[in-house]
Image: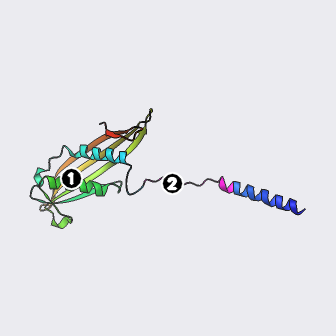
Amino acid sequence: MNRIKYLVVAVLAVVIMGLIGCTKNYTPIRREETGRPRVEQIAFSAALESAYKKIDLSFVRDKRVFVETKALSKQDIDYINSYVRKRVLAAGGNVVLEEPGAEIKLTNFLEVTGSDEVVRTFGKDLVVAQVRGNLTITDMKSMTITKIVDLKGSAQTKRNKKADTKIIE
């Protein structure tokens, strides 16, 4: 009789564990906040370069410039700010880190920043990145917007089985 009780308890325990193990447990899919995979970084950097390559920043020469970025995703804001600051410095401008000390304010309003990975046949992954929005140039002395420039850039990178990555567009 004891054996039957132990057998019933064991069967019930197995059934209960099976029910618990088979329940739906939704786990959200999230992207790592600190970075992208290498192939996505290459695509995103190339798309950013494509978006800004048409912009002539010669007007910032010898001016104090504050750079600000507003975007839907906060993941890339620091990188974009650093990229634009580097371009300002290369054009002879002086970057300031606080708005009150600036003569010119560059504001990036970005509607799209990101990348999608498309898996293709024959072991090649294709990553498509896009940057879209506008750059607003504000004269801080007169507090007027002097120009708005459209930003549109895209790039594709391809990774093969050997993990070689190259920009293809």
In the picture, the quarter occupied by the C terminus is top left
Percent of width and height locating residue 50: 24, 43
| Mark 1 element type | strand
| Mark 2 element type | loop
Percent of width and height locating residue 89: 15, 56
Percent of width and height locating residue 166: 32, 39
Residue 145 visible here: no
Q: Which circle, 2 or 1, is nearer the viewer? A: 2
User: In the image, is residue 56 above or below residue 61?
Assistant: above
First to last magenta residue range: 19-31
Does the magenta portion include 4?
no
Mark 2 surroundings within 10 Å by alpha-carbon count, few (fewer than 14), some (14 through 19), many (20 or more) = few
- At x 72%, y 57%, the residue is 16
Relative horizontal placement of residue 137, taking residue 43 as reference (left or right): left
Q: Judge by depth and name the residue closer to the eye, 40 or 96.
A: 40
Mark 1 surroundings within 10 Å by alpha-carbon count, few (fewer than 14), some (14 through 19), many (20 or more) = some
- At x 51%, y 54%, the residue is 28
- At x 83%, y 61%, the residue is 6
Percent of width and height locating residue 30: 46, 54
Residue tagged 1: 136
Residue 27 visible here: yes
Does the magenta portion include 27?
yes
The three-letter amino acid code for the residue at tag 1 is Thr
The three-letter amino acid code for the residue at tag 2 is Pro
- The quarter of the displayed image where residue 76 is located: bottom left
- The quarter of the displayed image where residue 156 is located: top left
Residue tagged 2: 28
